[in-house]
Each structure stands twice: as structure tokens, then as C-alpha cells.
Image (tube, rainbow, N blue to C red):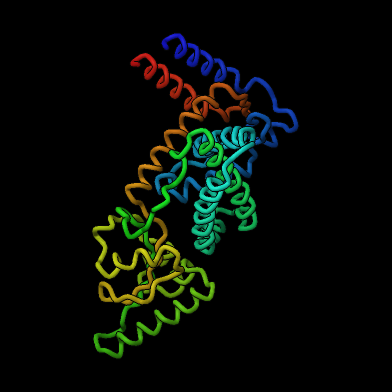
Amino acid sequence: MRKAAAALLSLAIALAAGAQDAAPRGGTMEESAAFVDGRLVTARDLNYAVFELRLGDPVFETIPDETLRRTALAEAVDEALLVRWAETVITDYPAEAVRRVADEQFAQYLQWAGSEELLELRLAEAGLSMRGLRQYNETRARGVFLVRLALAATMGPDALPPEDDSPSRATRVRLAAIHFVPKGRDERARLEAQERALMARREIVSGFPFARAAQLYSDDPASGVRGGDAGWMDASALAPELRERLGALRDATSSDPVFLGGAWQLVRLLDYDTEERRAWRERYAAGREARLLELRANRPVRFGPGYGDAWKERLRRGAEEASASSTQK
């Protein structure tokens, strides 16, 4: 085991040292940031990877573009490695497993599409186009889908989401809400606020994006600018009126108006965690990382000048961790 670990470490370091030596075929480094096992990682890929990092974590808002691009490149190279591998292994796959993974992927796409208006505003701030994001998302969604199929083929049931996964058993939830505060303390003011909530809900059910409705109509400016997104919270902390609605919110564009905290609210379930889903995510992440470690050490990667530092450091750390783990065994 020690010899195998030492060989893996040597191979990883050799790859890291030579990763920038050759220019890619079929493109130049002026056109691309990296060339991964026959696949270009383009400047557009990097732009959207940077955008996703900033959208997902406020910490990245303060990091300079060039530094963030190096972090984003490490993510983009890993994704390209996995997709390229997945394309080569999906040859024979059970139809039922394909359906389950496809359903789960489609549900995630619908969540993305539901916040399209909010994303469009963020894109405008970043100088990117909505058309470009759609194209990028379609490409990335295809890649995520292929990787999940390939991991399911090699990992078995551990790679598939749980079948019985009702939000009524959630341990954590991520909700969005639109607030309609009565303009006075009498019953008339309360009814007027309720009517505004009902009018907004009719628009949402007819296809108007929930996030955009929150920006236009919410009486809570702090959450309104975020499309109503209230972030993650423990399900046990929810008001009983919301907890009993979680099951019905799974496939709903919006709840009926519910009076909470002195305001009428329209609520949407953005995401949730159950014990089964959390355990599945941990298994899937472990399987994905194990596959990536193999791919980083054995698949050809070339970088534009100075671009590959973050990815090579990730490669080196992974090899050292694998070496330490093998030695302990």
C-alpha cells in the first residue's frame, strides 16, 4: 500500500510540474484557460464559474477577479475531467435508475428557472448576458446529469437520491417569502393586505416569477432584493402554520397567503434536507471526490500561462492525503 501511495504521489507531482508545458491541440491558450483530456475550458466557462462562486458565497464578493478566476479554474477543470470521464463510461444503464436521476436533475433545473429574474439582475451587474447563462446552464446541466449517471453506474444505489424524500420530514428548509404588511391596525387594513397577497399569488400561479414578485411587491426590502430568499433554517424553528404546509409546498409555485409575524406572507419552498437526503449527499460527495482523485492523477491537463496554480495545489494535497490514508491502513 505504501508503494502504491508513493507512486500516486510521484505521478501527481509529475503531472503538476508538466501541466503547463504543452499547448492544446485544436485551440490556443489565448482562446482557452485550460485543455482537459481533449476538452477546452474557455474564458466563458471561467466567467460563469466566477459568477456562481460569487452568487453562492458572499465571502467571494471581496476577492479580486484574477484571484477568484484561479479558484474558479480549479472548479472548471474538475468538472471537465468528470464530464469527459462520464461520457466514456455510460454505455449500458438501467432504465429505472436513469429515470430517477433525470427526475432529480429536472427538479433542480426548475428551481434554477424559478429564480431566473433574480439571476438576470445579478448578471446585468456582472456584465454577463441572460442568453449566455442559459447556454452555459444547458451545457452544465447536461454535464451534471452525465456525471450522476456515471457515478450511479460505478457506485450503485449510494449515488442515487432517496426515493421517499418528503419535505414533511425535513430537518432543514430553505424558504422564500413575500411580505404584505397591513397599513393600519384595524380589520380593514388587514383585509387590504390580504387582498394584495392574493393578487400577487394569482400572478405567480399564472407564471410570473416568484423572485420578481418579491422584488416588486414585498414590504420587507431586505428579503425582497434577494427574491424573497430567507436562507436555510431548522425545520423545528418554523411556525406550526408553515410546518404543516411543507408537504404541499414541494411542487407549489407559492403557498396561499398565511398570516405570520404581523404580515400576510406568500411562501415558496426552495430546498430542503432530510436525514436520508443529507446521508445521500455525503455518500455522493465522497464517491465523486474519490473519482476525481483518480482523474487528477491520470488524465492530461494543460494550462494557459500562470492559470494552473490552484488546480495543481489541489492535486498535490489530494495525493498527499491519499498517501497518508494508505499508510494508516
**From the viewer's perspective, is 35 left or right of 275?**
right
Q: Residue at x 48, y 45 (%)?
A: 53
8 vs 312: above or below = above
**Pick the front one: 9 or 285:** 285
In the image, residue 3 above or below residue 320: above
Q: Residue at x 47, y 79 (%)?
A: 202
Left-right relation of 185 to 308: left
User: Is 132 situated left or right of 276 in this image?
Assistant: right
Residue 209 spot, x, y in % from top left: 51, 68
Q: Which residue, as the protein is rendered here, is positioned at the far right?
A: 26
Q: Position of residue 206 (x, y in %)?
A: 53, 76
Residue 214, position in %: x, y? Answer: 43, 70
Q: Position of residue 269 (x, y in %)?
A: 40, 62
Q: Residue furthest top?
A: 3
Residue closest to the eye, 260 or 249: 249
**Which residue is more in the foreground, 312 or 12?**
12
